Amino acid sequence: MLYQETKKYDEISRKAFRSGPEIVGKSGIETAPFLAEFVRMTSNMYRLGWDERNGGNLSYLLEEAEVRDYPELSHPKRRISLGFCVPELKGRMLLVTGTQKYFKNMERDPETNTGIIRICENGEEADVLWGFRDGGRPTSELPSHLMSHVARLSVNPANKVVLHSHPTNLLAMNYVHPLDENQLTHTLWQMCTECIVVFPEGIGVLPWMLCGTSEIGRATAEKMKEFRVVVWGMHGVYGAGNTFDEAFGLVETIEKAAQIYMLTAHLKQINTIRDDQMRELAEFFGVTYRKGILKE
Ligand code: 13P
Ligand code: ZN
């Protein structure tokens, strides 16, 4: 290959695989541990088949100490209007996936597919500090993410992660199981021994609603005061946690339970985990489970 051609080829490769370590060295934010975890989580969600195309979104509330070493964040690139108001988060920074971006592509180019925003003093706008390199915007589900962060922080100041996803079996279950909080929780608790220990508060459920709106954001946040997981009827799920592992593990457990349901619901059931056994589990593991679901 001629030198000129090699240069051209390198340029094309660089554009296609911008963050490939073998082509361009990572620097600044791209070396941040929180970004690596964030990207790893979206990639896992993609590989599990939960997040087709641009489906799903993820947000992570950053602490000052985590971003201290990245001076590039002190120079806002542009300001965006949120279309809703979250005064509770003013001054807070979040790493969030971009709208219409594919989880499939996160690993290859986080700077285009994600971004870091800081909520302005008025609570109605945000500064883009890094990312959304192609002029993109945060996820269309930003109302649900930000309002859920506010709701979770009001009951648990350590909450940092909010995720939205379309897990296959949980979504399938929406079409064949009543969308009643207590009934759905009971069925899921019965599907795997450890469910009642992993989500003793049960799961919240919203009926089908128009997504990407402040209305669904407010409704999700209301549920998030009581539950760390909220099912969006015939759409997907919201999950929250103090760490990426916690939020992911929660949804992973629920999706596994839904899978067992979908594998067995059409078959003659001859065994089950009884309510008294679930109570025994909760007592042994010392968890306080939601009342009104198990027969007392
Ligand atoms: P975004 O591409 O805007 O993140 O939307 C994906 C999605 O799952 C909508 O509910
Ligand atoms: Zn969705």
Image (spheres, grey):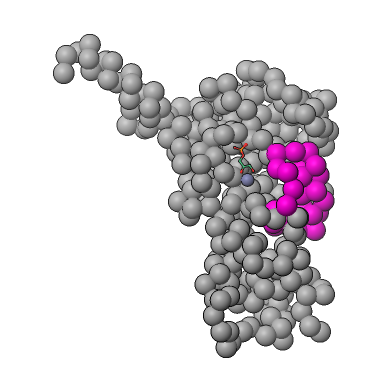
Left/right of residue 107 with respect to residue 22 in the rendered view: right
Residue found farthest to the left: 1
Residue 189, image x and y in percent? Answer: 66, 73
Q: Quadrant of residue 193?
A: bottom right
Residue at the bottom extreme, as displayed: 270
Of residue 212 and residue 273, the one placed in the foreground of this image is 212
Residue nearest the viewer, comparing 45 with 50: 50
* Residue at 66% across, 18% down: 78
Q: Residue 91's spot in the image, x, y percent?
A: 76, 29
Rendered position, 122 above or below 275: above
Vertical arrangement, residue 146 with respect to residue 207, above or below: above
Q: At x 53% / y 23%, what residue is drawn?
A: 133
At a point 81% along the width and 84% down the height, the residue shown is 296
**Image spot of residue 166 (x, y percent):** 59, 52
**From what the image shows, is residue 98 above or below residue 10?**
below
Q: Position of residue 163 (x, y in %)?
A: 63, 48
Q: Nearer the viewer, residue 34 or 226?
A: 226
Magenta residues span 208-232
